[in-house]
Image (cartoon, coloured by chain):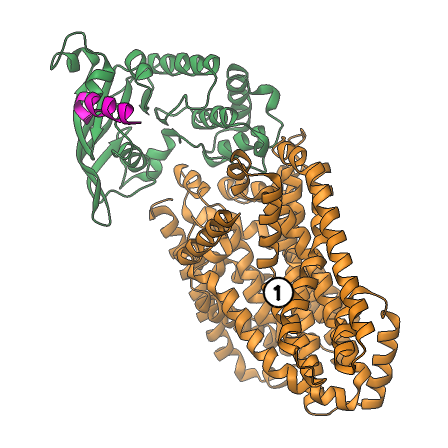
Chain colours: A orange, B green
Amino acid sequence: MATLVRWRIRITIARYRRSPMLFIGPIFGIGLFLLTLWASQGFFRVLVRLAPSFADAVLLLSYAAVGVFQILAGFRWGVTRLFLNSDLELLMCSPITRRRLFGLKILELVVASPISILILGAVTWGYARALNVVAAPLLAIVLPFVLATIAALPGMLVALVLARAMIGPRLRALIGLISPFLPLAWILLFGSASSLFGRVSQRRFDAQHFQRLGRSMVAAIEKSPTSWPGDIVRGIANGNWTLAARSVALVAIVSVALLAVTFAVFFATFEGSWMRLGEASSKRKSGTLIERIAPPIPMVARAIVVKEWRGFTRDLRLLQSLVFPVLILGFFTVNSLRATGSPPYALVFFIAFLVSNQAAIALLMERRNIGFLKLAPVRGIDIITGKVVAYVVPTGILTGAAVVAVGVVRHLSGPIIIVALAFMLWILGGSMLGGVGIAALWGKFDLERPRLGLGPSLLEMVVMPAFAATQGAFGFWIAGRLGENVGFLRSPVAGIPLLVLAGATAFVVAVLATSGGHRLEMFDAP
Amino acid sequence: MPQDAIRTDKLTKTFDRAVAVDALDLTVNRGEVFGFLGPNGAGKSTTIRMLIGLLRPTSGSAVVASFDVAKQPLEVKRRVGYMAENPYAYDKLTGREFLSFVGDLYQVPKNEVTERGTSLMKLLDLFDDADKIVEGYSRGMRQKLGLIAALIHEPDVLFLDEPTSGLDPRSARTVKDLLTELAHRGKTVFMSTHVLEIAEHMCDRVGIINHGQLVALGSLAQLRAHGRADASLEDIFLELTGGEDTAELTKFLAES
């Protein structure tokens, strides 16, 4: 077991050395932890004084939120670490007992949850310190560690059961589908938490209201496992040893029971599930529908479009990457329309960056198959065109429908809606073209995670939003000429400078795309 | 088409400071089955990858199917087929869709792709699996699909990296017969292999490369003329590339 763990650590270090970009995650996590640790103590001191019930509720909610995240993460890590990882074949061939293998995977699961453990640690620390518990450091280490681990076990159980019923490709697709929601869950959690932190630190909240709210929240879920950490801390703080001991016993019993059940299911199913993972996908008809509906562009680019679209129908990860930015855009648009009556114009910068990444990542996902494309009598620009069209059409249809819907809701005139639609498609296409150009120029095709192989992100962050902003501004100017109220952009003299700026950024995008195409023809394929 | 299907002139490739291929001068005739042999890391795959345009030569030049690889890459690619040792494939496409995709890349009319693809898949026992997702293919099936993809546009020159690797004996035999037949029809087959028995029986000529340099070139008879008359290709190969020292091997076995 110790040898396995040592080698796992060595392999991880080697991976980090090879891709320094991977350090971003841990650095971000440590920074976040230090920040939370620093803020937590002061936050809870104020909260315990003003609304103690709400302080209890915050601790409870933190464990609940991280618990939900851990269940998802446990499922994800259960599937990848127990079934899809390439080391499994080696481990299964080696004279390692299944018990040790399970132990190793549980350990990996714990190591894989540092952010959860650190966040809970910081929250528990702040709460325990605010209640003047001497053993705060010990509680801040043990409770998060144990509860984050047992929260992940149900997810792992689901993974074990699903792996019994599904073949490898389907499991992989499922993982790809839920993976983006994990960071999204963090973003929402931190968004809500930081807003609460801000209000508490500036005492901009109604203490009585929050006290009532906290009391009702605690009452609603007081019997759940997420209330145990609070009970333990409060029990120790108030000298209520019965409460503390009962909660510790409950944690221990549930931990042992969950471990035992997971281990039993693992022992009963793992070997059989793992062995049938490699089974071929079911036969499917080589359909012609996609070929028929693909746009009439040059044959080579069209072939790439058809290939990509076939992937959408068979790989949920691709479909999700396509729909995800549109969902974000839709969510913020609806929110913004409700709150201010106008669409979230600033979001265009974010979308331009996000959208420009879509086709770029699709290009890098070719990995060694880029050599296959280079083998054929194909121009680099055809490859780029194919990738862009493959993503522009579905994204354009979705966002186009959204633009028309917003236009109708806001009672805009027909010509204005048409101008908005045209510029939206133009910005979408241009952003993707520039993104693919950057990826083709500087991207790496030999990385396990294509996202890390993108070209200089800073350039993309500057060029694509600049392109979107200048094209958008020119679009608004045209809308102004058509009678729409667009503020200072309505001035007739603004047209020429705006056109020059829009032309300049469009020129940069064109240069990126053609240079990228040239590089695809010239570079040494991996 | 001139007699030479492939001609290299001082073709060189260096990676950082390591010389992978060192001033290679090589000529392969049209309609020839040429075996390119060498130990691991000798420069075989690098040479092939330069000839098909996947790598840029550091210096020197290469002409394939009468076109300069560096100056007229698209003309070369139209006339060349390549099967890598680990063939290229798109996991989410079915075998049939993959061939259709390849046909489109090479701008081959649809009906020709269907006709040629079907007959090749039947020949290589892949027809029943044509509508399965490539993800579920075995190594041998991927190898067959890679070969069919390399042949779908009827190339003049075929580059193959370990063509029978992963194939069962029956399929390997079919592939060998197919390649021989293609050569009879005037196609050039340039293959790299470690299976010396294949090279011995199939190839009109062989070239042996070691440390990036061509150390032998000719028919088996020509190579034998420089050593023992009864030497096998394996003997010649080991002699030229510094084979296993029997005394050392015996010592190792005795010690272990």
The residue drawn where x is 72% and y is 71% is: A62
**Quadrant for the C terminus of chain A in the image:** top left
Q: Is residue A337 left or right of residue A487?
A: right
Tell me, yes or no, if residue A397 can be seen here: no
Q: Is residue B134 left or right of residue A505?
A: right
Q: Is residue A48 above or below residue A504?
A: below
Q: Position of residue A423 (x, y in %)?
A: 60, 66
The residue drawn where x is 33% and y is 48% is: A522
- Which residue is outermost to the left? B226
Q: Is residue B195 above or below residue A429?
A: above
Residue A196, by quadrant, is bottom right
SS of the residue under disc 1: helix
Q: Give the residues in magenta.
A: B239-256
Q: Is residue A257 above or below residue B233?
A: below
Q: Nearer the viewer, residue A43 or A325?
A: A43
The residue drawn where x is 70% and y is 74% is: A343
Q: Amino acid at mark 1?
A: Met
Residue A329, by quadrant, is bottom right
Q: Position of residue A429 (x, y in %)?
A: 55, 59
The residue drawn where x is 69% and y is 56% is: A152
Magenta span includes A358: no
Q: Which residue is mark 1?
A: A424
Q: Position of residue A116 (x, y in %)?
A: 64, 66
Q: Chain of mark 1?
A: A
Tell me, yes or no, if residue A161 can be seen here: yes
Q: Nearer the viewer, residue A176 or A522?
A: A176
Give the prevailing secondary structure in the magenta stretch. helix
Number of numbered discs visible in the structure rendering? 1
